[in-house]
Amino acid sequence: MGIIAWIILGLLAGAIAKFLLPGKDPGGILLTMVLGVVGALLGGFLGKAIFNVDPMNGFFDVSTWIAAIAGSLIILIGYRLITGRRAA
């Protein structure tokens, strides 16, 4: 899977993660998309390192989407924890 496919996957995974974890986040949609791309990369890395699976089989493969969404959720939760402490 190419870098453009990972970017598109990350944008969509970020939107899905935002849908699954609604709430007021500073930064808006642009930051959510960037977090999605980073989360997709993190999910792919964790899937390979922890479960020894290749989550980069293809764009339409279920394991790719699960890894990207899980990574995006992890990044979004971490971002909320960091910005929540800083704002308080």
Image: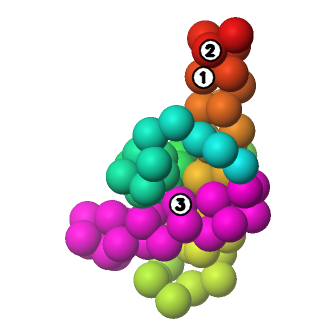
Q: CB atoms at circles 2 and 1 under 8 Å apart? A: yes
Q: Is residue 83 visible?
A: yes
| Residue 19 position in % (x across, y down) | 68, 66
Q: Which residues are magenta?
A: 1-22
Assign the magenta stretch its main secondary structure. helix
Q: Is residue 10 magenta?
A: yes
Identify which amino acid the numbered label 1 is placed on: Thr
Q: Nearer the viewer, residue 51 or 25?
A: 25
Q: Is residue 84 magenta?
A: no
Identify which amino acid the numbered label 2 is placed on: Ala
Q: Residues within 10 Å of mark 3 (few under 14, many from 20)?
A: many
Q: Nearer the viewer, residue 23 or 62?
A: 23
| Residue 6 position in % (x across, y down) | 36, 67
| Residue 55 position in % (x across, y down) | 56, 68
SS of the residue under disc 2: helix
Q: Residue at x 51, y 89 (%)?
A: 60
Identify which amino acid the numbered label 3 is placed on: Gly
Q: Nearer the viewer, mark 3 or mark 1?
A: 1
Image disc number at residue 87: 2
SS of the residue under disc 1: helix
Q: Nearer the viewer, mark 2 or mark 1?
A: 2
Give the alpha-carbon distance from disc 2 to disc 1, as whole Å. 6 Å
Task: Using residue 8 as the reference point, say whether residue 67 is left or right of it.
Answer: right
Image disc number at residue 83: 1
Query: In the rendered image, which quarter is residue 63 located in?
Result: bottom right
| 32 versus 82 height, above or below | below
Query: In the rendered image, which quarter is residue 31 located in?
Result: top left
Q: Residue at x 35, y 72 (%)?
A: 8
Determine which residue is flagged by label 3.
14
| 22 versus 84 height, above or below | below
